[in-house]
């Protein structure tokens, strides 16, 4: 391997690790993932590099480069997947949390106290995002336009920011907070029910497309064996394209339907 190629690989390695470090800093600063999670992912990646070197001996500079970057790519992909999963978990658990808040508020607690008690008993991985939501939601009228609160809101992921905005809106309606929380919970549950039924309908449509394709394939084989290609050539030239278009429309068209509640 030439010296120029070795220098190029070394330069790419340096640039790659600097870029990954900068990206990790941005992810932590923007609250996309916690710093402790990034540390764990980095530790696992370092262990993976060491294990790969021990199991598979290094024979060239290219081998070193591949072992350095493969765990790095896996670490970054794991970071994004972990963050997305936690954000979806916050949205999935939101109806249950709203139910707990409503129950506490009916017992005489304020929205602020109810949220604080809900977070005090929360030990799940979604607690980090819920804490961020509580920091954004201002419970003091004089802090409604606080600059730090606006910056904290802007740094949240879109899904979490939407939840925080809804809490802020409800907070500004002191006489109708319980009613608004109930309406919000019912709307989420209705959307989830409708989405589940929509997925079932799309799955049924695609299952029908698969069944039709199997039947058509079996019929085509039977016709070819019974009559030969020369006898059915003309009709098959029209039949096969039309059938493929129909199955494609049924498969992809069902997924492209705009479902509304």
Image (cartoon, grey):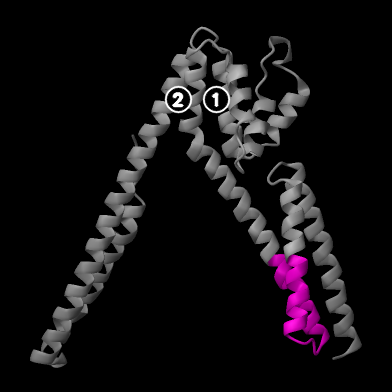
Residue pointed to by mark 2: 184
Residue pointed to by mark 1: 166
Residue 139's x, y, as percent? 66, 15
In which quadrant is the N terminus drawn?
bottom right
**Residue shown at 32%/55% (left/top)?**
253
Classify 10 Å Cα crowding around label 2: few (below 14), some (14-19), many (20 and above): some
Q: Which of marks 2 and 1 is nearer the N terminus?
A: 1
Is residue 238 visible to the viewer in this orientation of the structure?
no
Span of residues in magenta:
45-73
Q: In this view, does 240 lie to the left or right of 20?
A: left
Classify 10 Å Cα crowding around label 1: few (below 14), some (14-19), many (20 and above): some
Cα distance between the residues tagged 2 and 1: 9 Å
**Residue shown at 53%/44% (left/top)?**
88
Foreground residue among 159 and 112? 112
Q: Does the magenta stretch include residue 69?
A: yes
Query: In the rendered image, which quarter is residue 4 located in?
Result: bottom right
> Mark 1 and mark 2 in contact (Cβ < 8 Å)?
yes
């Amino acid at each position: 391997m030439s010296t120029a190629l070795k220098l190029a690989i070394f330069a790419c390695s340096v640039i790659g690790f600097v870029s990954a470090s900068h990206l990790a800093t941005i992810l932590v600063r923007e609250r996309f993932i916690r710093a402790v999670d990034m540390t764990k992912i980095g530790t696992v990646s370092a262990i993976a590099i060491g294990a790969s070197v021990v199991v598979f001996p290094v024979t060239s500079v290219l081998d070193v480069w591949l072992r350095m970057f493969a765990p790095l790519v896996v670490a970054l992909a794991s970071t994004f997947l972990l963050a997305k999963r936690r954000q979806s978990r916050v949205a999935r658990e939101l109806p249950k949390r709203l139910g707990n808040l409503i129950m506490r508020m009916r017992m005489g607690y304020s929205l602020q106290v109810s949220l604080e008690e809900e977070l005090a008993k929360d030990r799940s991985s979604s607690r980090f995002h819920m804490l961020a939501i509580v920091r954004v939601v201002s419970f003091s009228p004089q802090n409604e336009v606080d600059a730090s609160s606006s910056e904290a809101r802007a740094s949240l992921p879109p899904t979490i920011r939407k939840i925080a905005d809804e809490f802020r809106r409800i907070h500004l309606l002191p006489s109708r907070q319980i009613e608004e929380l109930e309406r919000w919970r019912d709307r989420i549950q209705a959307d989830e029910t409708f989405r589940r039924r929509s997925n079932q309908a799309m799955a049924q449509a695609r299952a029908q497309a698969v069944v039709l394709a199997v039947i058509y394939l079996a019929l085509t084989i039977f016709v070819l064996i019974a009559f030969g290609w020369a006898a059915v050539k003309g009709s098959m030239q029209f039949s096969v394209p039309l059938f493929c278009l129909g199955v494609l429309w049924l498969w992809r068209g069902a997924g492209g339907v705009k479902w509304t509640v």
